[in-house]
Image: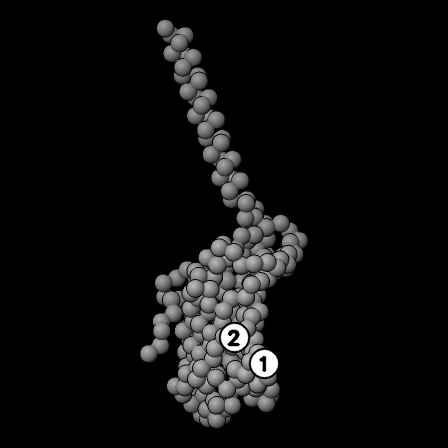
Amino acid sequence: MLERRQMFTKNLLLSIVSLVCLLSFSTIAFACACCAEPGTYSIWTGEPDGYYLGVLEDMKFDQTAELFMTEAGFDLIKGLGDIRREYESDSWVTTGGRFDLAATFTSNVWNFRLKTPGGRTGSLVLPIPDQMLTYKVDQHDSEDKGNGPVLYKEFRFKGKISNGAGFLRSSMIRPSTYFLVFQGRGNGCDNASDFSNWRLEINGRNARYAFFGKLSSGTPSGKSEIMQ
């Protein structure tokens, strides 16, 4: 009887140790599934599947955007003549030139609505293209703390604009195209929280301009509100 108890106790201990080892191995394997390798350089082009669509749906835009400007000002910009006078006024300077932004991604379409410092509104409707590009690279500027380097990454989308309204309408002579880029840092897996910035470039027969801004994905305060 005593031998049976000892044998039972021994087998139980062995089972517990095996289970602990298995769980530990699974945790390590799961943790390293997203580990990046030193020297990573990856460019992939393909269809945005359910996984990527889920990441895009989780991205939240901050509520302001800026118009990309060089020292040439509006001289190198096409399609925004309706707001040039406002740009050259004092009101633009006092507000820092920031636009109010409400941007959403629903039903595979981005909707951007912008309001100038002076109150003029414009909107763009951007259907997601059939192909997207992901770019990941080890820039050798982060310390490896056991999970690999922190990668610089981008999601890139090039597509056709389906509609433009307000102060953006005059630039929408078909075909007008967009180039939307999401930028961030993270490990080998892609999550909405990795991406911190965006840039939207518009080009066409009467369009050449770009907006940029930040993302606040994963935080309730980052949820865009539709402007009234």
Camera-side residue of 15 and 210: 210
Query: Which residue occupies 64% across, 56% down?
Result: 42
Which of the two discs, 2 and 1, labels the residue nearer the N terminus?
Answer: 2
User: SS class of the residue under badge 2?
Assistant: loop
Q: Is residue 88 above or below residue 61?
A: below
Residue 89: x %, y % from top left: 46, 93
The image quarter containing residue 92 is bottom left
Q: Which of the numbered marks, if any, corresponds to residue 161?
A: 2
Query: Which residue occupies 46% across, 26% down?
Result: 17
Label 2, residues with CA under 10 Å away: few <14, some 14-19, many ≥20: many
Position of 68 with respect to 12 (left or right) is right
The CA distance from mark 2 to mark 1 is: 10 Å
Position of 98 with respect to 206 (left or right) is left
Query: Which residue occupies 51% across, 44% down?
Result: 31
Label 1, residues with CA under 10 Å away: few <14, some 14-19, many ≥20: some
Res 152 visible: no
Camera-side residue of 101 and 141: 101
Camera-side residue of 97 and 156: 156
Q: Is residue 135 above or below residue 118?
A: above
- The amino acid type found where label 2 is placed reads Ile
Residue 96: x %, y % from top left: 46, 83
Q: Which of the numbered marks, if any, corresponds to residue 103?
A: none
The image quarter containing residue 219 is bottom left
Res 176 visible: yes
Residue 83: x %, y % from top left: 47, 89
Q: Which residue is mark 1?
A: 204
The number of discs equals 2
Camera-side residue of 12 and 223: 223
Residue farthest top in this picture:
1
Q: Is residue 119 above or below residue 192?
A: below
Query: Which residue occupies 33% across, 78% down?
Result: 228
User: SS class of the residue under badge 1?
Assistant: strand
